[in-house]
Amino acid sequence: MASNQASTARAKLADAAALETTSRLLAALINESLALVTIESPNDVSSLALWSRNELNAKSTHILVSLRQDSKYELVLPPTQIAGKTIMPTISPELDPADIVGPVTVKHSDGREQASYRPEEVFDVVGAWICGKQPALLARLRGELQNSADNQEEWLQFSLSHPAPVLGAPLIEWEQRCFRGHPTHPMHRSFFATPPMKPIQIDDIEEFLNAEITIIAVPRARIHLDGPFETSLEPLLTKLNLAAVPADHVLLPCFVEQVPVIHEHFGTDAKVVPSKKKLYGQRQAAMRTVSISGFPFHVKMALSCTITSATRTMTPWTARMCIEVSQLLQGIAADPDIMPDPDLLWIFRKVATACSADADFEEAKHLSVMLREDLEPRARELGQCFVLPATLFEVGGKDRIAHVVRLFSLKTLEACKAWFREYVTPPHSPFTCHVT
């Protein structure tokens, strides 16, 4: 009996995870006008039908999508219509993926009906609508969607034993409890390794978030250093009891998974330095930035993985400009004509970087490190705390209520408005006060 209950619970979790990805895919198709949308009646937007823009007839394969009962949308025709062009009505306001109820139904042209939660099954229908006949692209996107849903299942399993953070919790807790990832991107939880990196199977989120870091030695002639990189890193390296390296080499941290990629692009010039202690960092929401206990900087490192549909490497110009951009932002924050109250804008300064000096940025982008100031101690001294907005506004649970509503007991519309006035208006004002 217990085994059956556990199996049923896991199946429901898998469906919920798949719907997180499928709903984002469908909402993107609708909001970006990549599919034609129809409704059964002009006054009823409780369900939608999605069709190919290029093949519309009553027998065409299409997808039926149900919406939450209390959602409020309307179908709007474009203000201007071009002769000979298909009229593309839109949903107003933009469709929130959280308002989609599963499963969705695929009505095939041969009369078959298929109920599904899985994004790859939905993509088997809509892929041709948006990509045409491009097998490689279709296969890649399908794989990313499937990977996103599979990873989301592990994140939801993780959420069962890790409740949403409370005010005063460390920032890393907020970073790691954004259970559902990007709120609208279909690849919100994708994590694809790029060869020669070994495939990454996420079976244990807690273990995955505790990223192992290794230290490599690279000839100085092959590295650009900006800012006090080595002196800033020295206290961390000293604790590791590293083997000695030649003076003409520089020590760089990198993800353990990244080593095969670095070796492919830098050959034997990049050597892993033996260490008597292992080094771990807690992954932040961006996954390639980690917090290391006792170290006053966040460490951002190139990671040759596709995360939310982009490969998270770092080009040399991105790395080398970050210090100047930080200085520019500090100047803006200190300008009373732009920022009347400088305490409203804190700059997480990038203080030092290291990146490949290879002229070919396609090679160089696989080896970059940034050190970013950690401002959490400053907040604690002031009796304040940081929160991650993505986690604060994440919608979850059977009632589909955002975490911020529970955390601040925002039970009425007036309470929500008052909260926005208190927490959103003050920091927003400095960004608009200089606009005439």
Image (tube, grey):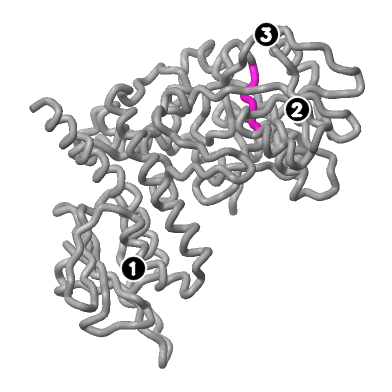
- Residue 422, how many percent across, how many down? 38, 32
- Residue 70, how many percent across, how many down? 16, 52
The three-letter amino acid code for the residue at tag 1 is Val
Quadrant, the C terminus: bottom right
Magenta residues span 296-301
Q: Report crowding for label 2: few under 14, some 14 to 19, many 20 or more residues within 10 A (C-alpha).
A: many
Farthest residue in the bottom direction? Answer: 84
- Residue closest to the eye, 155 or 77: 155
Upstream in sequence: badge 2 or badge 3: 3
The three-letter amino acid code for the residue at tag 3 is Lys
- Asked if the residue at tag 3 contacts the one at tag 2, i.e. Cβ–Cβ closer than 8 Å, the answer is no
- Residue 421, how many percent across, how many down? 37, 37
Q: Describe residue 103's horizontal placement relative to residue 271 as left or right.
A: left
- Residue closest to the eye, 409 or 283: 283
Circle 2: element type? strand
Residue 310 visible at all: yes
Task: Please identify, in this view, whether the residue under mark 1 or under mark 2 is nearer the observer.
Answer: 1
Asked if residue 293 is positioned above or below residue 316 in the image, the reply reads above
- Asked if the residue at tag 2 contacts the one at tag 1, i.e. Cβ–Cβ closer than 8 Å, the answer is no
Q: Which residue is mark 3?
A: 276
Circle 3: element type? loop
Is residue 299 in the magenta section?
yes
Residue 328 visible at all: no
Q: Describe residue 386's horizontal placement relative to residue 120 as left or right.
A: right
- Residue 109 circle label: none
Q: Which residue is mark 2?
A: 352
CA–CA distance in space, label 2 to label 3: 26 Å
- Residue 125 circle label: 1
